[in-house]
């Protein structure tokens, strides 16, 4: 069923060369994402769980005020997720070491290089901008929530309480601000620079440098460098990411790859089924015709036999009639002769 | 051939009507709630569980169980199994109703229903599997509608026009099969994008194939199943052709279903082998998977076979019901049970009574519509005026 | 035409593909009719 | 009639449907496979016959040994209920093994002396374990598992929290005392010709030098040796109602129990003809070089003995000099192909000088500053001279005799000037105002002098590390460098704001902005030094009045 992407590309590429005259498309392509796209490196070892980022986010995005004030850190005691009213949340994880040292880390949209939400959206409500953010356009959104199914980080949220105009709500990477050259709200608010902001390449460099310089402090893994094809938010941590509830089993396949194979077979079916089906149809039709042919012959034969029989019967009947007639005549003649003989004896 | 009088004379307070009435009433209330309070007011959906019963049952099962239309018409018109001809119209009808109801249900689930055509008129997200599903379902609904409208061209009695109509049936049938192939499989492909959320035993690169094959099973089984129901409740409406061919349909489709089930079983096993998921079989999810595979694929396969060999019509009918249930179980597993398996049970989804209520409502609407149509239109018998000239 | 993300590339190629599909279907129907109407004349 | 039937059918179908839904949900209830909490025990012995007889069809048994010992004790039964007596092998009984007078000892195996074959061993376990449990059950006592699955289960309910046990110098001292300085009680060597153990005086080393983790021909494994000797000796001691060491697993292998083991303070020095001061050579034993390229390192052996719990820490393979195995030029097999320089400088390894010193820097008194410093070899060449000291001007050629060597080393060591403390209080700014700040808060007042003095205080106060600091901190300004980094030591170092400005400087990614710098430095240090305060933001800088 699922044609390999390579094969599909080759197929499309061939079409491309002929139909579109575009550059050699037959080779399997590799996409590096937007050069110079912006990125945040979240150094989890530096996060102090002050929720300043949540405050900043709430302020710059004009989100509704929270149920509990941001200054109240008790909310950290239970795990939270992004909601339609909060684009980002800080969570606390108690290290399983001897002294239960709390580890804080921030969660928000990771702005994938190849966003699953965008790949899944059937009205292209999501766009991967060249600045690196994945933005959402509510003016076309139908509200099918397939993006929420698709997102491997379970980030997009939905305004379930909106009867007629529900939107998908998620971090925008402060796209309007970033394009103006400002920092994202959370980054600007972070007092410890647990969030570093810059070009993705630079942030990767920074992350590697930190790992090299302080081998003891970090696990040797930059989360988001390759996960799901890479993201524009990167993470450094002192404990394995899975301990923080960040999935390490996502793999490196970009989301669009996952469905492209299946989609690639659509043209095949559309083009080949008609031939196949009409072929079968033709066969069955032909069989049928042959059958009907036989039937006619059979009928004809039956008729012929029937005629023959009736003929025979007829002739037989006529014979009989003839014989009876003759007998009757002879009888009549005989009686006549006898009578005449009797007459002559009396005279 | 029925008399209008005995319809009029029947009192409207039959138990069926009463129950249906109640359900429809409740459904309307839920509808009101949905479109005033939003999904939050009526569903248990959450940010972790964006798709619930209305997708799992109304969409996935709805579409699968409405597969009878394309299966039957393909069998009769393409594979030339004329002896099942009487089964076509009911199948087409249920297919049409099924898809209509799916679309109806979507209007509840989707945030802004009036935007459903957007992907095709405003902005097309061609990388989305959902786009393909949408397109195919939409087109197929139209196709079914045309197939459902009686062949008007016969009235005109023009030979050319008639040939054209005959060709049109072919065209529609082929188109129907293409569209069904595509969207039945794509409903499975929808989940290809979430390998991290769907349990490995159900996630497979073959999931589109699974969905397509199982839709054929669903189609065949539904035809048998409905056939037995209609026969029970609408025998009066059936003409002797239908009554005569009914048996053939049951045995023929039963045989087909059995064989397809065998193939389905095989591909499911291949699925496990391809991703080397054997070890999961020993887990609790594995147990449940085996229940599905053995109880709802292997078992009906064998029961069908037995029924066909022993000419046991009742066995086949019950098996059909079981197989249909099996398809429902499968769709539930993919969409609800095995999806988000990684989440703690506190975050898992279970439908609210109102969600269930609405699904029941949708089904009831379907039943009522079916009842109405078969009562007043020539579905289970051929109208003497337009005897279709089939040998 | 150049793309920096796989997503954009697929959007483009799949878009083309869908258009081609529609054309193909229509085309093939027409072609089928063209192929077959001869036979029907014979039948007359 | 027909109706009844049909209703029956429908109910049947309904039931199945409901049943399925319930099953489905129960399946749904299950979580993704994850680590479930297990009881930690130090006494888990995995009864696993696979190494000897190959894989069995059932999972191995996690056997809580102490649990059984307790019950034995309660029931006034001794070890021999489960362990048989075996006669000591020639080699051992002849040699100076523990309790030479006794010719028998306790077998460590369960109810047998050797592993004959799977069938028999299995029978032994099943008969005895189950038999005993059964008998207890009959007596109406609390009894252990009887059914296969109860013992043979995957993912055992216990997790082994067994900590490797060892003999530190304090414990060694207690043993020598107990054995009236008869080293031969435990220490022995093996005579290949006589095929027996003998006592080589002055050659004693730690058991591990010979007894490896696995049994080799003519030398049993460390676990076997220790349990045969230590446990046996303790057991006999207990029999004789003497004060004897633990006989239970947890006694030696449970982290909490290990804490309880009495420590000798102050610990007298161990006698093994080791030098007080010595030169760590910069050449392999057999290496000839016109002159060593690096100065040999005078080493205060005596005080280092005090810094570590065992000799093994440094003398990881033998009690001889480092350069007898590690060479400067060609890596030697004896030295496991580790060259001398790595043996001495390898970061992160406790057996190397620098590695160990850096580990010491993690002590909370030091960590405040050192946590920020990149680990590994220091680049500055002058820091090399800290150890590779220049020969004293007056001293002539390197002495030939060991005695002379010791003397010279001692002289050099004494010539060092330990640096304690920092600049005089008066020269240290008292307060620093950090005003370049966000609109949200008032400027922060940093009690500079207080902080410095508390740093110095901690530094000098630290038990094992103060010397290290004293000898390795170059001068009075060194301690300032914890914060005033990346600039030469001076009494007037640059201000933070001279380097740190706005954040995310593309020119120097590693350099945080001023606000980030403050928070990282202050909070990082406080965290590393385990200083609990301040908890709230406002403890450092007050909220600005709006």
Image (cartoon, coloured by chain):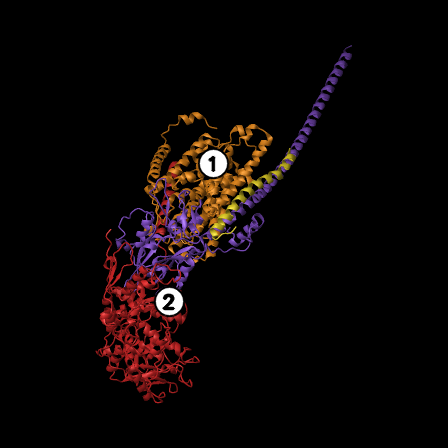
Chain colours: A purple, B orange, C yellow, D red
Mark number for residue A213?
2
Q: Is residue A176 above or below residue D94?
A: above
Q: Is residue D73 visible?
A: no
Q: Is residue D248 left or right of residue A342?
A: left
Give the secondary structure at mark 1. helix
Residue B239 in the image: state x and y as whole percent. 49, 32
What chain letter is assigned to the residue under label 1? B
How busy is the neighbourhood of tag 1: few (under 14 within 10 Å), some, or many (20 plus)? many
Mark 1 or 2: in front is 2
Check the image and name the residue furthest to the top: A347
Cβ atoms at labels 1 and 2 below 8 Å apart: no
Check the image and name the residue furthest to the bottom: D401
Q: Is residue D429 left or right of residue B68?
A: left
Q: Is residue B327 left or right of residue D407?
A: right
User: Residue B325's image quarter?
Assistant: top left
* Spatial separation of the CA atoms under disc 1 and disc 2: 71 Å
Q: Which residue is mark 1?
A: B93
Residue B310 in the image: state x and y as whole percent. 49, 44
Frontmost residue, D96 versus B177:
B177
Frontmost residue, D26 versus D503:
D503
Residue B363 in the image: state x and y as whole percent. 40, 38
Residue D518 in the image: state x and y as whole percent. 30, 62
Q: Is residue B142 visible?
A: yes
Q: Is residue B328 above or below residue A303?
A: below
Q: Is residue D366 above or below residue A296?
A: below
What chain letter is assigned to the residue under label 2? A
Q: Are marks 1 and 2 on the same chain?
A: no
């Amino acid at each position: 069923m699922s044609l390999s992407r390579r094969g599909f590309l080759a197929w499309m590429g061939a079409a491309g060369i002929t139909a579109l005259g575009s550059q050699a498309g037959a080779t399997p392509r590799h996409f590096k994402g937007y050069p110079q796209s912006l990125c945040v490196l979240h150094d989890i070892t530096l996060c102090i769980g002050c929720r300043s980022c949540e405050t900043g986010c709430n302020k710059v995005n004009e989100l509704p005020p929270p149920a509990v004030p941001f200054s109240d850190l008790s909310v950290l005691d239970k795990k939270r997720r992004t909601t339609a009213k909060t684009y980002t949340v800080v969570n606390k994880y108690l290290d399983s070491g001897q002294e239960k040292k709390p580890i804080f880390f921030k969660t928000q949209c990771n702005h994938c290089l190849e966003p699953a939400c965008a790949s899944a959206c059937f009205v292209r409500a999501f766009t991967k901008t060249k600045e690196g953010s994945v933005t959402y356009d509510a003016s076309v959104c139908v509200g099918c929530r397939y993006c929420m199914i698709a997102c491997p980080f379970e980030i997009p949220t939905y305004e379930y309480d909106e009867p007629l105009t529900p939107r998908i709500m998620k971090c925008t990477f402060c796209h309007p601000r970033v394009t103006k050259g400002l920092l994202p709200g959370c980054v600007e608010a972070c007092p410890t620079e647990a969030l570093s902001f810059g070009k993705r390449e630079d942030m990767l460099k920074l992350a590697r440098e930190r790992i090299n310089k302080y081998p003891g402090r970090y696990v040797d893994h930059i989360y988001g460098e390759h996960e799901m094809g890479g993201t524009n938010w990167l993470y450094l941590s002192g404990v394995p990411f899975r301990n923080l509830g960040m999935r390490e089993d996502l793999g490196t396949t970009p989301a669009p790859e996952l469905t492209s194979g299946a989609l690639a077979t659509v043209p095949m079916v559309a083009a080949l089924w008609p031939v196949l089906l009409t072929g079968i149809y033709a066969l069955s039709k032909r069989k049928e015709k042959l059958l009907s042919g036989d039937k006619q012959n059979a009928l004809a034969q039956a008729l012929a036999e029937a005629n023959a029989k009736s003929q025979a019967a007829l002739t037989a009947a006529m014979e009989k009639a003839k014989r009876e007639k003759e007998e009757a005549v002879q009888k009549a003649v005989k009686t006549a002769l006898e009578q005449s003989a009797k007459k002559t004896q009396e005279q | 051939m029925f008399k209008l009088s005995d319809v009029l004379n029947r009192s409207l307070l039959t138990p069926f009507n009463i129950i249906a009435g109640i359900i429809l009433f409740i459904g309307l209330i839920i509808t009101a709630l949905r479109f005033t309070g939003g999904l939050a007011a009526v569903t248990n959906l959450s940010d972790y569980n964006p798709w619930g019963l209305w997708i799992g049952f109304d969409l996935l099962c709805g579409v699968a169980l409405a597969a009878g239309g394309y299966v039957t018409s393909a069998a009769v018109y393409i594979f030339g199994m004329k002896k099942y001809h009487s089964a076509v119209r009911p199948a087409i009808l249920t297919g049409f109703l099924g898809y209509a109801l799916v679309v109806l249900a979507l209007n509840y689930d989707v945030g802004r229903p009036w935007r459903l055509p957007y992907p095709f008129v405003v902005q097309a997200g061609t990388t989305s599997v959902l786009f393909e599903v949408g397109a195919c379902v939409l087109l197929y609904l139209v196709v079914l509608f045309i197939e459902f409208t009686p062949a008007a061209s016969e009235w005109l009695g023009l030979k050319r026009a008639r040939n054209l109509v005959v060709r049109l049936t072919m065209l529609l049938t082929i188109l129907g099969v293409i569209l069904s192939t595509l969207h039945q499989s794509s409903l499975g492909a929808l989940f290809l994008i979430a390998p991290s959320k769907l349990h490995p035993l159900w996630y497979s690169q073959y999931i589109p194939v699974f969905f397509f094959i199982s839709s054929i099973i669903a189609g065949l089984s539904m035809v048998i199943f409905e056939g037995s129901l209609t026969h029970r409740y609408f025998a009066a409406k059936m003409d002797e052709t239908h009554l005569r061919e009914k048996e053939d349909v049951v045995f023929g489709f039963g045989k087909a279903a059995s064989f397809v089930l065998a193939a389905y079983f095989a591909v499911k096993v291949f699925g496990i082998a391809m991703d080397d998921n054997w070890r999961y079989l020993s887990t609790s999810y594995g147990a449940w998977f085996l229940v599905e595979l053995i109880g709802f694929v292997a078992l009906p396969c064998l029961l069908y076979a037995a029924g066909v060999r022993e000419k046991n019509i009742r066995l086949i009918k019950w098996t059909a019901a079981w197989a249909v249930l099996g398809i429902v179980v499968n769709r539930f597993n993919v969409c609800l049970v095995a999806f988000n398996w990684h989440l703690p049970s506190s975050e898992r989804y279970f439908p609210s009574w109102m969600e269930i209520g609405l699904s029941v409502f949708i089904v009831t609407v379907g039943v009522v519509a079916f009842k109405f149509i078969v009562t007043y239109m020539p579905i289970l018998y051929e109208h003497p005026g337009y005897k279709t000239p089939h040998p | 035409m150049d793309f920096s993300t796989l997503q954009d590339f697929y959007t483009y190629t799949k878009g083309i593909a869908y258009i081609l599909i529609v054309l193909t279907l229509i085309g093939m129907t027409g072609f089928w009719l063209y192929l077959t109407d001869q036979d029907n004349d014979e039948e007359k | 009639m027909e109706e009844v039937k049909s209703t029956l059918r429908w109910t049947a179908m309904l039931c199945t449907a409901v049943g399925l839904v319930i099953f489905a949900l129960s399946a749904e209830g299950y979580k993704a496979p994850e680590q479930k909490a297990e009881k930690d025990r130090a006494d888990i012995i995995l009864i696993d016959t696979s190494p000897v007889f190959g894989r069995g069809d059932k999972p191995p048994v996690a056997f809580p040994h102490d649990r059984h010992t307790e019950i034995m004790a309660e029931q006034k039964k001794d070890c021999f209920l489960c362990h048989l007596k075996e006669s000591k092998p020639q080699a051992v009984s002849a040699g100076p093994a523990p309790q030479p007078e006794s010719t028998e000892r306790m077998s460590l195996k369960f109810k047998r002396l050797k592993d004959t074959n799977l069938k028999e061993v299995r029978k032994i376990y099943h008969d005895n374990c189950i038999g005993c449990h059964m008998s207890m059950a009959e007596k109406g006592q609390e009894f252990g598992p009887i059914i296969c699955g109860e013992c043979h289960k995957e993912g055992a309910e216990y997790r082994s929290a067994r900590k490797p046990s060892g003999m530190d110098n304090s414990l060694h001292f207690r043993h020598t005392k107990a054995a009236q300085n008869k080293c031969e009680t435990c220490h022995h060597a093996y005579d290949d010709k006589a095929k027996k153990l003998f006592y080589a005086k002055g050659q004693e080393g730690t058991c591990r030098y010979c007894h490896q983790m696995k049994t080799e021909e003519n030398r049993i494994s460390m676990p076997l040796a220790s349990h045969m000797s230590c446990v046996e000796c303790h057991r006999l001691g207990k029999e004789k109602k003497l004060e004897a060491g633990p006989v239970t697993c947890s006694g030696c292998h449970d982290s909490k129990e290990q804490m309880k083991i009495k420590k000798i303070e102050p610990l007298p020095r161990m006698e093994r003809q080791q030098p007080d001061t010595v030169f760590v050579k910069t050449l392999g034993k057999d290496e000839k070089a016109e002159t060593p390229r690096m100065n040999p390192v005078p080493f205060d052996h005596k005080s280092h003995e005090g810094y570590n719990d065992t000799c093994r820490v440094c003398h990881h393979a033998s009690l001889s000099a480092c350069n007898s195995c590690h060479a400067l030029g060609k890596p030697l097999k004896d030295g496991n192909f580790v060259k001398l320089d790595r043996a001495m400088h390898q970061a992160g390894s406790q057996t190397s000088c620098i590695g160990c010193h850096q580990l010491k820097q993690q002590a909370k008194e030091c960590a405040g500053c050192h946590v920020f410093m990149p680990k590994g070899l220091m680049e500055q060449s002058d820091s090399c001279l800290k150890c590779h000291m220049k020969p004293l001007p007056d001293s002539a050629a390197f002495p030939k005799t060991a005695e002379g060597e010791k003397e010279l080393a001692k002289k050099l060591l004494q010539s060092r000037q330990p640096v304690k403390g920092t600049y005089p209080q008066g020269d240290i700014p008292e307060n620093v105002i950090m005003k370049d700040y966000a609109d949200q808060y008032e400027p922060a007042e940093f009690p500079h002098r207080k902080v410095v003095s508390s740093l110095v205080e901690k530094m000098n106060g630290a038990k094992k590390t103060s010397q290290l600091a004293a000898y390795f901190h170059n001068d009075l300004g060194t301690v300032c460098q914890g914060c005033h980094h990346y600039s030469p030591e001076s009494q007037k170092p640059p201000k933070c704001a001279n380097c740190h400005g706005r954040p995310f400087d593309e020119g120097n990614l590693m350099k945080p902005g001023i606000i980030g710098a403050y928070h990282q430095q202050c909070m990082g240090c406080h965290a590393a030094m385990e200083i609990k305060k301040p908890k709230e933001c406002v403890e450092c800088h007050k909220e600005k009045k709006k």
